[in-house]
Amino acid sequence: MIILLYHHGVLTFIILLLLHLTLATTDNEVCSEDYNDAPSNSNNFYAWSLGDYPSLLNALFPNLGRFQTAWETHPLLSRVSFQQEQDTQPLDNKQIIPTIQHNRQLISQLKLINNQHQDEDPILSLLSVDDTALILTQPDMTHGNEYKLLKKIIIQDGPEKGEEYNGMLPGTQYSLQDILQHFHYGAFSLIINKVEQRWRRIANFAHQLEDELGVVEVNTNLYMTPEVVSEKDRTNEDKKNGNVREGFEAHWDWMDVIIVQLSGMKRWSVARESSIYLSSKDQKRKPTSKELKHVQRYDDFTLCPGDILYIPRGSIHNASTIEFEHLQESNSDLDSCPPYPNDALDRRVGPSLHLTFGLLESNDATIETLLHYALDEYHESSDNEIAVSASTCSSLNSHGVAVSHDIRWSSVFHHVIAEVARRAHICDHILQTNREPSSTDINCNEGTGILRKSVPLMLDDIIGSSQQYLNLKQTYMSGLNILVSSANLTKTATFIQTHLLKPPPDDDALIFHYPSYSQDDVIICPEALNGLPGDIFIHQLKSFNQYASEQFDKAFASLNNWGKQRRQDDRQQQRISLDRVGQ
Protein backbone atom coordinates (compact mmCIF):
# COMPACT_ATOMS: atom_id res chain seq x y z
CA MET A 1 0.00 0.00 0.00
CA ILE A 2 2.95 2.30 0.51
CA ILE A 3 3.72 2.30 -3.21
CA LEU A 4 0.07 2.89 -4.09
CA LEU A 5 -0.14 5.75 -1.63
CA TYR A 6 3.16 7.21 -2.85
CA HIS A 7 2.20 7.30 -6.55
CA HIS A 8 -1.55 7.47 -6.41
CA GLY A 9 -2.32 9.44 -3.28
CA VAL A 10 -5.75 10.64 -4.41
CA LEU A 11 -6.97 7.19 -5.45
CA THR A 12 -5.67 5.67 -2.23
CA PHE A 13 -7.40 8.29 -0.14
CA ILE A 14 -10.74 7.60 -1.85
CA ILE A 15 -10.36 3.95 -0.89
CA LEU A 16 -9.41 4.92 2.66
CA LEU A 17 -12.28 7.38 2.88
CA LEU A 18 -14.81 4.74 1.86
CA LEU A 19 -13.37 2.54 4.57
CA HIS A 20 -13.61 5.43 7.04
CA LEU A 21 -17.25 6.10 6.23
CA THR A 22 -18.03 2.42 6.61
CA LEU A 23 -16.28 1.99 9.94
CA ALA A 24 -16.75 5.46 11.47
CA THR A 25 -18.14 5.30 14.97
CA THR A 26 -20.07 7.70 17.15
CA ASP A 27 -16.91 8.75 18.97
CA ASN A 28 -15.40 10.08 15.72
CA GLU A 29 -12.76 7.39 15.32
CA VAL A 30 -12.01 7.26 11.64
CA CYS A 31 -11.24 3.56 11.38
CA SER A 32 -9.70 0.63 13.19
CA GLU A 33 -5.93 0.62 13.54
CA ASP A 34 -4.25 -1.31 10.73
CA TYR A 35 -0.51 -0.79 10.60
CA ASN A 36 0.51 -3.01 7.71
CA ASP A 37 1.97 -0.10 5.77
CA ALA A 38 5.01 0.41 7.97
CA PRO A 39 8.35 0.09 6.16
CA SER A 40 10.46 -2.85 7.25
CA ASN A 41 13.45 -0.65 8.08
CA SER A 42 12.80 2.99 8.93
CA ASN A 43 16.47 3.61 9.78
CA ASN A 44 17.55 3.58 6.14
CA PHE A 45 17.34 7.34 5.61
CA TYR A 46 20.22 8.29 7.90
CA ALA A 47 23.31 9.94 6.44
CA TRP A 48 25.63 7.38 8.01
CA SER A 49 23.70 4.41 6.60
CA LEU A 50 24.84 4.74 2.99
CA GLY A 51 28.40 3.41 3.24
CA ASP A 52 30.21 6.76 3.35
CA TYR A 53 31.20 6.25 6.96
CA PRO A 54 31.92 9.44 8.91
CA SER A 55 35.24 9.52 10.70
CA LEU A 56 34.05 9.89 14.30
CA LEU A 57 31.15 7.43 14.12
CA ASN A 58 33.32 4.92 12.30
CA ALA A 59 35.92 5.13 15.05
CA LEU A 60 33.42 4.85 17.90
CA PHE A 61 31.22 2.19 16.26
CA PRO A 62 33.38 0.55 13.56
CA ASN A 63 30.60 -1.91 12.75
CA LEU A 64 28.10 0.71 11.58
CA GLY A 65 25.71 -1.99 10.42
CA ARG A 66 25.31 -3.00 14.06
CA PHE A 67 24.99 0.64 15.07
CA GLN A 68 22.22 1.21 12.53
CA THR A 69 20.38 -1.88 13.76
CA ALA A 70 20.64 -0.58 17.33
CA TRP A 71 19.60 2.99 16.42
CA GLU A 72 16.41 3.90 18.32
CA THR A 73 15.89 0.18 18.98
CA HIS A 74 18.24 -1.22 21.61
CA PRO A 75 21.45 -0.30 23.51
CA LEU A 76 24.87 -1.02 22.02
CA LEU A 77 28.22 -1.22 23.82
CA SER A 78 31.46 -0.42 21.98
CA ARG A 79 34.38 -1.72 24.02
CA VAL A 80 38.02 -0.71 23.92
CA SER A 81 40.19 -3.21 22.09
CA PHE A 82 43.94 -3.22 21.52
CA GLN A 83 43.68 -6.03 18.97
CA GLN A 84 43.59 -5.59 15.20
CA GLU A 85 40.46 -7.67 14.67
CA GLN A 86 37.11 -6.12 15.57
CA ASP A 87 35.39 -9.08 17.18
CA THR A 88 31.64 -8.83 17.69
CA GLN A 89 29.54 -10.51 20.33
CA PRO A 90 26.93 -12.95 18.95
CA LEU A 91 23.30 -11.83 19.23
CA ASP A 92 21.91 -15.14 20.47
CA ASN A 93 22.40 -14.35 24.18
CA LYS A 94 19.59 -12.01 25.21
CA GLN A 95 21.10 -11.51 28.66
CA ILE A 96 24.34 -9.94 27.42
CA ILE A 97 24.20 -6.41 26.04
CA PRO A 98 24.97 -6.32 22.28
CA THR A 99 28.66 -5.49 22.02
CA ILE A 100 31.21 -4.54 19.38
CA GLN A 101 34.86 -3.56 19.78
CA HIS A 102 36.71 -0.49 18.57
CA ASN A 103 40.42 -0.44 17.97
CA ARG A 104 42.54 2.36 19.41
CA GLN A 105 44.30 2.80 16.07
CA LEU A 106 41.07 4.16 14.60
CA ILE A 107 40.64 6.42 17.63
CA SER A 108 44.18 7.76 17.19
CA GLN A 109 43.22 9.09 13.75
CA LEU A 110 40.79 11.54 15.38
CA LYS A 111 43.48 13.87 16.71
CA LEU A 112 42.57 16.73 14.41
CA ILE A 113 39.04 16.88 15.81
CA ASN A 114 40.10 18.20 19.19
CA ASN A 115 43.66 19.44 18.51
CA GLN A 116 45.27 17.13 21.04
CA HIS A 117 48.99 16.91 21.55
CA GLN A 118 50.71 14.05 19.78
CA ASP A 119 50.88 11.84 22.86
CA GLU A 120 47.26 12.37 23.98
CA ASP A 121 44.39 9.97 23.47
CA PRO A 122 41.67 11.79 21.46
CA ILE A 123 38.85 10.37 23.59
CA LEU A 124 40.34 10.17 27.06
CA SER A 125 41.86 13.64 26.77
CA LEU A 126 38.45 15.24 26.30
CA LEU A 127 38.35 15.91 30.04
CA SER A 128 40.14 14.84 33.23
CA VAL A 129 39.22 14.91 36.91
CA ASP A 130 41.53 17.92 37.34
CA ASP A 131 39.79 19.68 34.43
CA THR A 132 36.49 19.16 36.25
CA ALA A 133 37.85 21.14 39.21
CA LEU A 134 38.80 23.97 36.85
CA ILE A 135 35.28 24.08 35.42
CA LEU A 136 33.83 24.36 38.92
CA THR A 137 35.86 27.54 39.47
CA GLN A 138 34.51 29.21 36.32
CA PRO A 139 32.19 32.23 36.74
CA ASP A 140 28.43 31.84 37.25
CA MET A 141 28.62 28.24 38.47
CA THR A 142 25.46 27.93 40.56
CA HIS A 143 24.50 24.75 42.37
CA GLY A 144 21.13 23.46 41.23
CA ASN A 145 21.50 24.97 37.76
CA GLU A 146 24.96 24.70 36.21
CA TYR A 147 25.96 21.82 38.48
CA LYS A 148 24.42 19.52 41.07
CA LEU A 149 25.61 17.42 43.99
CA LEU A 150 23.22 14.53 44.48
CA LYS A 151 22.90 10.85 45.29
CA LYS A 152 20.25 8.20 45.09
CA ILE A 153 17.97 7.86 48.10
CA ILE A 154 15.85 4.77 48.72
CA ILE A 155 12.85 5.28 51.00
CA GLN A 156 13.14 2.81 53.87
CA ASP A 157 9.72 3.09 55.56
CA GLY A 158 6.14 4.19 54.99
CA PRO A 159 3.85 3.90 51.96
CA GLU A 160 6.70 4.75 49.56
CA LYS A 161 9.07 2.14 50.94
CA GLY A 162 11.45 0.99 48.21
CA GLU A 163 10.90 4.01 45.96
CA GLU A 164 14.01 5.69 44.56
CA TYR A 165 14.63 9.45 44.51
CA ASN A 166 17.48 11.85 43.78
CA GLY A 167 18.68 13.60 46.94
CA MET A 168 20.29 16.95 46.08
CA LEU A 169 22.07 19.35 48.43
CA PRO A 170 19.91 22.45 49.10
CA GLY A 171 22.35 25.37 48.72
CA THR A 172 23.13 27.42 45.61
CA GLN A 173 26.78 28.30 46.31
CA TYR A 174 29.54 25.89 47.40
CA SER A 175 33.28 26.42 47.46
CA LEU A 176 35.49 23.95 45.63
CA GLN A 177 36.66 22.64 48.98
CA ASP A 178 33.06 22.06 50.10
CA ILE A 179 32.27 20.30 46.83
CA LEU A 180 35.23 17.96 47.29
CA GLN A 181 34.20 17.24 50.87
CA HIS A 182 30.65 16.31 49.85
CA PHE A 183 31.99 14.28 46.95
CA HIS A 184 34.63 12.22 48.74
CA TYR A 185 33.10 11.91 52.20
CA GLY A 186 29.40 12.47 51.61
CA ALA A 187 29.19 10.08 48.64
CA PHE A 188 27.52 12.75 46.49
CA SER A 189 27.93 12.50 42.72
CA LEU A 190 28.76 15.60 40.70
CA ILE A 191 26.80 16.56 37.58
CA ILE A 192 27.77 19.52 35.38
CA ASN A 193 25.15 20.47 32.80
CA LYS A 194 25.89 21.68 29.26
CA VAL A 195 29.62 21.26 29.69
CA GLU A 196 30.03 21.90 25.94
CA GLN A 197 29.54 25.57 26.83
CA ARG A 198 32.51 25.44 29.24
CA TRP A 199 35.13 23.19 27.61
CA ARG A 200 36.11 23.67 23.96
CA ARG A 201 37.31 20.13 23.27
CA ILE A 202 33.93 18.78 24.31
CA ALA A 203 32.15 21.39 22.17
CA ASN A 204 34.23 20.30 19.14
CA PHE A 205 33.42 16.65 19.81
CA ALA A 206 29.69 17.43 20.17
CA HIS A 207 29.73 19.43 16.91
CA GLN A 208 31.30 16.48 15.11
CA LEU A 209 28.50 14.24 16.38
CA GLU A 210 25.92 16.81 15.27
CA ASP A 211 27.36 16.97 11.77
CA GLU A 212 27.75 13.23 11.28
CA LEU A 213 24.41 12.20 12.78
CA GLY A 214 22.43 15.02 11.16
CA VAL A 215 21.05 16.19 14.51
CA VAL A 216 20.18 19.75 15.43
CA GLU A 217 21.97 19.90 18.76
CA VAL A 218 24.01 17.73 21.12
CA ASN A 219 23.96 18.63 24.80
CA THR A 220 26.75 17.24 26.98
CA ASN A 221 26.55 16.54 30.70
CA LEU A 222 29.43 15.48 32.93
CA TYR A 223 28.91 12.80 35.59
CA MET A 224 31.50 12.02 38.25
CA THR A 225 30.80 9.49 40.98
CA PRO A 226 33.15 8.87 43.93
CA GLU A 227 34.97 5.59 44.12
CA VAL A 228 34.07 3.19 46.89
CA VAL A 229 35.99 3.93 50.08
CA SER A 230 38.09 1.49 52.05
CA GLU A 231 36.44 -0.51 54.81
CA LYS A 232 37.81 1.64 57.63
CA ASP A 233 36.33 4.82 56.07
CA ARG A 234 32.87 3.43 55.35
CA THR A 235 29.92 5.19 56.91
CA ASN A 236 26.81 3.47 58.19
CA GLU A 237 25.07 4.63 55.02
CA ASP A 238 27.77 3.00 52.88
CA LYS A 239 27.31 -0.27 54.72
CA LYS A 240 23.52 -0.04 54.45
CA ASN A 241 23.77 0.47 50.68
CA GLY A 242 26.18 -2.42 50.23
CA ASN A 243 29.08 -0.02 49.70
CA VAL A 244 27.59 1.15 46.39
CA ARG A 245 27.66 4.80 45.34
CA GLU A 246 25.04 6.05 42.92
CA GLY A 247 24.05 9.54 41.83
CA PHE A 248 20.80 8.76 40.06
CA GLU A 249 17.66 6.75 40.52
CA ALA A 250 16.77 4.28 37.78
CA HIS A 251 15.32 6.39 34.96
CA TRP A 252 14.88 6.78 31.23
CA ASP A 253 15.87 9.76 29.11
CA TRP A 254 13.77 11.59 26.52
CA MET A 255 16.72 11.78 24.13
CA ASP A 256 19.08 9.18 22.71
CA VAL A 257 22.44 9.29 24.46
CA ILE A 258 26.03 8.31 23.68
CA ILE A 259 28.06 7.77 26.86
CA VAL A 260 31.85 8.01 26.88
CA GLN A 261 33.71 6.64 29.91
CA LEU A 262 36.82 8.77 30.52
CA SER A 263 38.33 7.42 33.74
CA GLY A 264 37.51 5.05 36.57
CA MET A 265 35.06 2.18 36.21
CA LYS A 266 31.31 2.16 36.59
CA ARG A 267 28.83 -0.68 36.86
CA TRP A 268 25.76 -0.27 34.61
CA SER A 269 22.31 -1.79 34.64
CA VAL A 270 20.38 -1.29 31.38
CA ALA A 271 16.95 -2.48 30.29
CA ARG A 272 16.72 -4.82 27.31
CA GLU A 273 13.63 -3.01 26.03
CA SER A 274 12.22 0.49 26.14
CA SER A 275 9.74 1.35 28.85
CA ILE A 276 8.19 4.08 26.73
CA TYR A 277 9.20 3.37 23.14
CA LEU A 278 11.07 6.45 21.81
CA SER A 279 9.81 8.55 24.70
CA SER A 280 9.19 12.24 24.08
CA LYS A 281 10.05 14.89 26.66
CA ASP A 282 6.51 15.21 27.97
CA GLN A 283 6.26 11.43 28.49
CA LYS A 284 9.22 11.19 30.83
CA ARG A 285 8.43 10.40 34.47
CA LYS A 286 9.90 8.51 37.37
CA PRO A 287 9.16 4.78 37.12
CA THR A 288 7.73 3.28 40.30
CA SER A 289 9.41 0.45 42.19
CA LYS A 290 6.56 -1.82 41.09
CA GLU A 291 7.21 -0.99 37.46
CA LEU A 292 10.95 -1.51 37.88
CA LYS A 293 10.31 -5.09 38.98
CA HIS A 294 9.00 -5.87 35.51
CA VAL A 295 11.98 -4.43 33.66
CA GLN A 296 13.95 -7.08 31.80
CA ARG A 297 17.63 -6.11 32.09
CA TYR A 298 20.86 -7.19 30.52
CA ASP A 299 23.39 -8.71 32.87
CA ASP A 300 25.17 -5.88 34.68
CA PHE A 301 28.36 -4.79 32.93
CA THR A 302 31.27 -2.46 33.63
CA LEU A 303 32.25 0.55 31.55
CA CYS A 304 36.02 0.90 31.28
CA PRO A 305 38.00 4.00 30.29
CA GLY A 306 37.44 4.57 26.56
CA ASP A 307 34.27 2.44 26.34
CA ILE A 308 31.29 3.90 24.45
CA LEU A 309 27.64 3.11 25.24
CA TYR A 310 24.60 4.02 23.13
CA ILE A 311 21.16 3.99 24.81
CA PRO A 312 17.98 4.90 22.90
CA ARG A 313 15.44 7.17 24.56
CA GLY A 314 12.88 5.44 26.74
CA SER A 315 15.24 2.71 28.02
CA ILE A 316 15.63 2.52 31.81
CA HIS A 317 19.19 2.53 33.12
CA ASN A 318 21.27 3.42 36.16
CA ALA A 319 24.92 3.17 37.15
CA SER A 320 27.12 3.06 40.23
CA THR A 321 30.65 2.65 41.47
CA ILE A 322 31.03 -0.55 43.45
CA GLU A 323 33.70 -2.50 45.30
CA PHE A 324 35.81 -3.38 42.28
CA GLU A 325 38.53 -4.89 44.48
CA HIS A 326 36.19 -7.78 45.24
CA LEU A 327 35.29 -8.17 41.58
CA GLN A 328 38.97 -8.19 40.71
CA GLU A 329 39.46 -11.22 42.91
CA SER A 330 36.68 -13.01 41.04
CA ASN A 331 38.29 -12.08 37.71
CA SER A 332 35.06 -10.55 36.38
CA ASP A 333 36.06 -6.93 35.84
CA LEU A 334 39.83 -6.79 35.65
CA ASP A 335 39.73 -8.78 32.43
CA SER A 336 37.15 -6.44 30.87
CA CYS A 337 39.16 -3.33 31.78
CA PRO A 338 42.70 -3.93 30.55
CA PRO A 339 45.38 -1.32 31.31
CA TYR A 340 46.34 0.99 28.47
CA PRO A 341 49.68 0.05 26.88
CA ASN A 342 52.53 2.41 27.69
CA ASP A 343 50.27 4.50 29.90
CA ALA A 344 51.89 5.78 33.07
CA LEU A 345 48.47 6.21 34.70
CA ASP A 346 46.09 3.43 35.58
CA ARG A 347 42.90 5.03 34.29
CA ARG A 348 40.80 2.29 35.89
CA VAL A 349 41.26 3.57 39.44
CA GLY A 350 39.82 6.66 41.08
CA PRO A 351 36.42 8.31 40.67
CA SER A 352 34.28 7.35 37.72
CA LEU A 353 34.08 10.15 35.15
CA HIS A 354 31.93 9.95 32.04
CA LEU A 355 30.30 12.28 29.54
CA THR A 356 26.76 11.86 28.25
CA PHE A 357 26.11 13.31 24.80
CA GLY A 358 22.35 13.86 24.46
CA LEU A 359 21.11 13.80 20.86
CA LEU A 360 18.30 16.33 20.88
CA GLU A 361 16.94 15.43 17.45
CA SER A 362 15.12 12.66 19.23
CA ASN A 363 12.69 15.15 20.73
CA ASP A 364 12.72 17.98 18.21
CA ALA A 365 12.73 16.41 14.75
CA THR A 366 10.56 13.34 14.18
CA ILE A 367 8.03 12.06 11.66
CA GLU A 368 5.45 13.59 14.00
CA THR A 369 7.24 16.93 13.63
CA LEU A 370 7.00 16.71 9.85
CA LEU A 371 3.25 16.16 10.13
CA HIS A 372 2.96 19.25 12.35
CA TYR A 373 4.86 21.30 9.77
CA ALA A 374 2.72 19.91 6.94
CA LEU A 375 -0.38 20.88 8.91
CA ASP A 376 0.99 24.36 9.44
CA GLU A 377 1.71 24.74 5.73
CA TYR A 378 -1.76 23.43 4.90
CA HIS A 379 -3.60 25.96 7.06
CA GLU A 380 -1.47 28.79 5.72
CA SER A 381 -2.70 27.92 2.23
CA SER A 382 -6.37 27.39 3.12
CA ASP A 383 -9.09 28.78 5.35
CA ASN A 384 -8.31 27.93 8.96
CA GLU A 385 -11.89 27.66 10.13
CA ILE A 386 -13.06 27.89 13.71
CA ALA A 387 -13.91 24.47 15.13
CA VAL A 388 -15.11 25.60 18.58
CA SER A 389 -16.18 29.19 19.25
CA ALA A 390 -15.04 31.19 22.26
CA SER A 391 -18.61 31.23 23.55
CA THR A 392 -18.41 27.44 23.81
CA CYS A 393 -14.77 27.10 24.86
CA SER A 394 -13.99 28.57 28.27
CA SER A 395 -12.18 27.54 31.43
CA LEU A 396 -10.52 28.90 34.54
CA ASN A 397 -6.81 29.69 34.43
CA SER A 398 -4.37 28.94 37.23
CA HIS A 399 -5.47 32.17 38.98
CA GLY A 400 -9.13 31.17 38.93
CA VAL A 401 -10.01 33.74 36.25
CA ALA A 402 -12.38 32.77 33.44
CA VAL A 403 -10.68 32.65 30.02
CA SER A 404 -12.02 31.81 26.58
CA HIS A 405 -10.86 31.81 22.97
CA ASP A 406 -11.76 30.36 19.61
CA ILE A 407 -10.29 26.97 18.77
CA ARG A 408 -9.39 26.54 15.11
CA TRP A 409 -9.17 23.30 13.21
CA SER A 410 -5.39 23.66 13.00
CA SER A 411 -5.17 23.49 16.81
CA VAL A 412 -7.49 20.49 16.88
CA PHE A 413 -5.34 18.57 14.42
CA HIS A 414 -2.06 19.46 16.12
CA HIS A 415 -3.47 17.75 19.21
CA VAL A 416 -4.80 14.83 17.14
CA ILE A 417 -1.28 14.27 15.76
CA ALA A 418 0.21 14.50 19.27
CA GLU A 419 -2.29 11.98 20.68
CA VAL A 420 -1.72 9.42 17.93
CA ALA A 421 2.06 9.70 18.32
CA ARG A 422 1.81 9.13 22.08
CA ARG A 423 -0.78 6.38 21.96
CA ALA A 424 0.11 3.24 23.91
CA HIS A 425 2.32 1.14 21.67
CA ILE A 426 3.10 -2.56 21.60
CA CYS A 427 6.69 -1.75 22.54
CA ASP A 428 5.80 0.46 25.52
CA HIS A 429 6.75 -2.35 27.88
CA ILE A 430 6.31 -0.47 31.13
CA LEU A 431 2.60 -0.28 30.29
CA GLN A 432 2.37 -3.99 29.59
CA THR A 433 3.69 -5.58 32.75
CA ASN A 434 1.41 -8.62 32.51
CA ARG A 435 3.20 -10.16 29.55
CA GLU A 436 6.67 -11.34 28.76
CA PRO A 437 8.56 -8.85 26.56
CA SER A 438 9.32 -10.23 23.13
CA SER A 439 10.85 -7.42 21.09
CA THR A 440 12.77 -9.88 18.94
CA ASP A 441 9.42 -10.98 17.48
CA ILE A 442 7.96 -7.47 17.20
CA ASN A 443 8.66 -4.74 14.69
CA CYS A 444 8.58 -1.67 16.90
CA ASN A 445 8.69 0.53 13.82
CA GLU A 446 5.16 -0.49 12.95
CA GLY A 447 2.09 1.50 13.88
CA THR A 448 2.31 4.70 15.86
CA GLY A 449 5.98 3.96 16.47
CA ILE A 450 6.74 5.40 13.02
CA LEU A 451 5.58 8.83 14.19
CA ARG A 452 8.15 8.67 17.01
CA LYS A 453 11.13 8.02 14.72
CA SER A 454 13.65 10.83 14.45
CA VAL A 455 14.44 12.60 11.18
CA PRO A 456 18.00 13.55 10.14
CA LEU A 457 18.38 17.17 9.12
CA MET A 458 20.92 19.20 7.13
CA LEU A 459 20.37 17.05 4.03
CA ASP A 460 20.32 19.88 1.47
CA ASP A 461 22.68 18.11 -0.90
CA ILE A 462 20.39 15.11 -1.34
CA ILE A 463 16.92 16.66 -1.26
CA GLY A 464 14.64 15.29 -3.95
CA SER A 465 17.06 12.89 -5.61
CA SER A 466 18.82 10.31 -3.45
CA GLN A 467 17.48 7.00 -2.25
CA GLN A 468 18.01 8.25 1.28
CA TYR A 469 15.60 11.12 0.69
CA LEU A 470 13.05 8.85 -1.01
CA ASN A 471 13.21 6.44 1.92
CA LEU A 472 12.51 9.28 4.33
CA LYS A 473 9.59 10.42 2.20
CA GLN A 474 8.22 6.88 2.14
CA THR A 475 8.34 6.70 5.93
CA TYR A 476 6.58 10.08 6.15
CA MET A 477 3.82 8.82 3.82
CA SER A 478 3.41 5.72 5.96
CA GLY A 479 3.14 7.92 9.07
CA LEU A 480 0.52 10.07 7.36
CA ASN A 481 -1.47 6.95 6.51
CA ILE A 482 -1.32 5.83 10.14
CA LEU A 483 -2.51 9.25 11.30
CA VAL A 484 -5.48 9.16 8.91
CA SER A 485 -6.33 5.62 10.03
CA SER A 486 -6.10 6.45 13.73
CA ALA A 487 -7.43 9.99 14.20
CA ASN A 488 -9.96 10.01 17.00
CA LEU A 489 -11.54 13.10 18.59
CA THR A 490 -12.68 11.32 21.74
CA LYS A 491 -9.21 9.94 22.42
CA THR A 492 -7.74 13.36 21.69
CA ALA A 493 -10.11 14.99 24.18
CA THR A 494 -9.16 12.43 26.83
CA PHE A 495 -5.47 12.91 26.07
CA ILE A 496 -5.73 16.69 26.55
CA GLN A 497 -7.77 16.38 29.73
CA THR A 498 -5.47 13.77 31.27
CA HIS A 499 -2.03 14.96 30.23
CA LEU A 500 -2.21 18.65 29.45
CA LEU A 501 -4.65 20.43 31.73
CA LYS A 502 -3.52 18.72 34.93
CA PRO A 503 -1.24 20.37 36.04
CA PRO A 504 -1.87 23.67 34.24
CA PRO A 505 -0.35 23.92 30.75
CA ASP A 506 3.37 24.46 30.54
CA ASP A 507 5.04 25.71 27.38
CA ASP A 508 7.78 23.09 27.56
CA ALA A 509 5.34 20.19 27.76
CA LEU A 510 3.02 21.51 25.05
CA ILE A 511 5.49 21.78 22.19
CA PHE A 512 4.55 18.38 20.70
CA HIS A 513 7.64 18.49 18.49
CA TYR A 514 6.16 21.62 16.96
CA PRO A 515 8.16 24.81 17.65
CA SER A 516 5.32 27.19 16.69
CA TYR A 517 2.92 25.84 19.30
CA SER A 518 1.55 28.73 21.37
CA GLN A 519 -1.03 29.44 24.04
CA ASP A 520 -3.52 30.17 21.25
CA ASP A 521 -3.31 26.49 20.36
CA VAL A 522 -4.16 25.31 23.87
CA ILE A 523 -7.55 23.61 23.93
CA ILE A 524 -8.93 24.65 27.30
CA CYS A 525 -12.27 22.89 26.64
CA PRO A 526 -11.34 19.40 25.40
CA GLU A 527 -14.82 18.07 26.13
CA ALA A 528 -16.10 20.28 23.29
CA LEU A 529 -14.23 18.10 20.78
CA ASN A 530 -16.72 15.30 21.39
CA GLY A 531 -19.49 17.53 20.03
CA LEU A 532 -17.81 18.24 16.70
CA PRO A 533 -19.71 16.78 13.72
CA GLY A 534 -18.06 13.63 12.41
CA ASP A 535 -18.64 14.51 8.76
CA ILE A 536 -16.85 17.86 9.13
CA PHE A 537 -13.98 16.13 10.93
CA ILE A 538 -13.63 13.61 8.09
CA HIS A 539 -13.81 16.41 5.53
CA GLN A 540 -11.01 18.28 7.31
CA LEU A 541 -8.97 15.10 7.57
CA LYS A 542 -9.46 14.34 3.87
CA SER A 543 -8.34 17.81 2.83
CA PHE A 544 -5.26 17.70 5.05
CA ASN A 545 -4.30 14.22 3.85
CA GLN A 546 -4.49 15.22 0.22
CA TYR A 547 -2.37 18.32 0.81
CA ALA A 548 0.19 16.65 3.08
CA SER A 549 0.69 13.71 0.72
CA GLU A 550 1.74 16.15 -2.00
CA GLN A 551 3.79 18.58 0.10
CA PHE A 552 6.44 16.50 1.82
CA ASP A 553 9.24 18.56 0.25
CA LYS A 554 7.80 21.79 1.61
CA ALA A 555 7.26 20.37 5.11
CA PHE A 556 10.78 18.95 5.23
CA ALA A 557 12.28 22.22 3.98
CA SER A 558 10.49 24.11 6.77
CA LEU A 559 11.75 21.67 9.41
CA ASN A 560 15.26 21.73 7.93
CA ASN A 561 15.38 25.53 7.91
CA TRP A 562 14.25 25.61 11.53
CA GLY A 563 17.00 23.12 12.41
CA LYS A 564 19.66 25.19 10.65
CA GLN A 565 18.66 28.34 12.47
CA ARG A 566 18.53 26.60 15.83
CA ARG A 567 21.96 25.05 15.31
CA GLN A 568 23.40 28.40 14.22
CA ASP A 569 21.96 30.14 17.30
CA ASP A 570 23.14 27.36 19.61
CA ARG A 571 26.72 27.39 18.30
CA GLN A 572 26.86 31.17 18.51
CA GLN A 573 25.79 30.96 22.16
CA GLN A 574 28.45 28.31 22.76
CA ARG A 575 31.14 30.54 21.29
CA ILE A 576 30.11 33.38 23.57
CA SER A 577 30.09 31.09 26.63
CA LEU A 578 33.46 29.52 25.79
CA ASP A 579 35.08 32.91 25.24
CA ARG A 580 33.64 34.17 28.52
CA VAL A 581 35.25 31.34 30.53
CA GLY A 582 38.57 31.56 28.70
CA GLN A 583 38.12 28.51 26.50
Image (cartoon, rainbow, N blue to C red):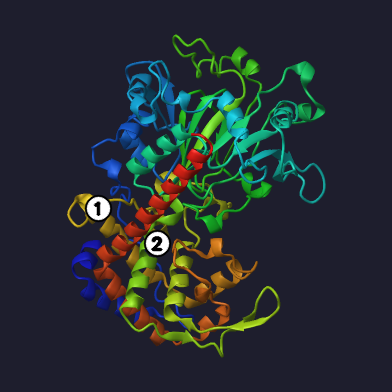
Quarter of the image where one finds residue 541: bottom left
Front residue of 304 and 90:
304
Contact (CB < 8 A) between labels 2 and 1? no
Residue 516 visible somewhere in the drawing: yes
Closer to the eye: label 2 or 1: 1
> Gap in Å between the C-alphas at discs 2 and 1?
18 Å
Report whether 10 appears left or right of 337: left
Amino acid carrying label 1: it is Asp
Front residue of 83 and 108:
108
Residue 444 visible somewhere in the drawing: no
Amino acid carrying label 2: it is Thr
- The answer to whether 581 is drawn above or below residue 282 in the figure is above
Q: Residue at x 36, y 31 (%)?
A: 61
Q: Residue furthest bottom?
A: 391
Quarter of the image where one finds residue 299: top right
* x and y percentages locating residue 38 in the rendered image: 32, 58
Q: Quadrant of the N terminus?
A: bottom left
Residue denoted by label 1: 460
Report whether 69 appears left or right of 254: left
Q: Residue at x 41, y 36 (%)?
A: 204
